[in-house]
Amino acid sequence: MFKFDFVDPHRHFSTTVLIEASHSPTLHYAILAVSSRHLSLTSPTSVYYKNSVIPDHYQHKCLKTLIPALKDPDALLDEGLFAARVILRLFDEMTGSLLLYNSNLDRDLRVKESSANAQGKNDLDLAVMFCDQIWLVFIAFYSAISGKPNS
Amino acid sequence: MAETSNTELQEEPLADAAFDVEVLSDPTNISTRHSAMTSSLEGHHLLNGPSSVVVSDSWHAPSPSSYPGLWPVSTQEEAQLIRYFLTELSSWVGSPLLSQRILGCSD
């Protein structure tokens, strides 16, 4: 199974991202969404099993804070935003909706991310970027399709 | 494999617990998940049971004061989901203090 810190020796998603989530509503709800979605698909004993209402509710709350943040110049400083994008990608894959993938929202986030990276990368930025690329490779293998690099 | 000289951290009360909820090891199955958490990770940490955490010398836990004091978790459900993310979707990392501090629990 894919894990965000699969190849990250510093395990940023288990440490830094969780800390960021304590003051980033977007990241907070992204985590809640993906966790509940995963439980809804994999855990028959869970109250979330086959329940899409709760994951969708958290995703909705996440997007409600994510979309306005794209218009905020200070959002460049919110490292949680980019981590949330990667987490929401997993959510989409599990849902099968691919709502975020290649959407305008995804592109806007990537533009923001590039702008932020141009101002200097920190450890978390690099971890998120790396996780994103690993995720693409993982999907390519998992889906038995050829990987198509995002540009 | 890292040095095996370990320091045992006994469960201790949190000075300013982030929130007052009982956080379960897993939302799905309390008892089995709790025992399943007894695991080893190379050079990072060992969870020996509900009341003790053994941290190897190769991993230095950040000071608890470096963690945010408040986590905006309003319900136990949210706390469980965050813990699930930590243990199942990111990775179980050698950060028992983080788990203890943020989620208000210890394994």
Image: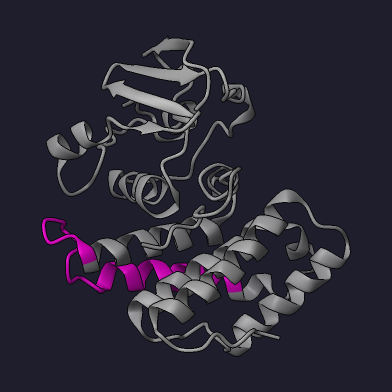
Q: For this view, does A29 lie left or right of residue B59?
A: left
Dominant SS type (magenta): helix
The segment highlighted magenta reads: A42-66
Whether residue B76 is visible: yes
**Residue B72 appears at what percent x and percent y?**
48, 45
The residue drawn where x is 26% and y is 73% is A53
Residue A51 falls inside the magenta stretch? yes
The residue drawn where x is 49% and y is 10% is B5
The residue drawn where x is 35% and y is 30% is B20
**Residue B106 appears at what percent x and percent y?**
34, 25
Depth check: give the residue in front, A67 or A16: A16
Q: Height in image: B82 above or below B63?
A: below
**Residue A11 appears at what percent x and percent y?**
56, 45
**Residue A43 appears at what percent x and percent y?**
18, 60
Quadrant occupied by the N terminus of chain A: bottom left
Q: For this view, does A55 lie left or right of residue A104?
A: left
Quadrant occupied by the C terminus of chain A: bottom right
Task: Give the image quarter of residue B19.
Answer: top left
Residue A147 falls inside the magenta stretch? no
The residue drawn where x is 41% and y is 41% is B92
Q: For this view, does B102 lie left or right of residue B61?
A: left
Q: Height in image: A131 above or below B78?
A: below
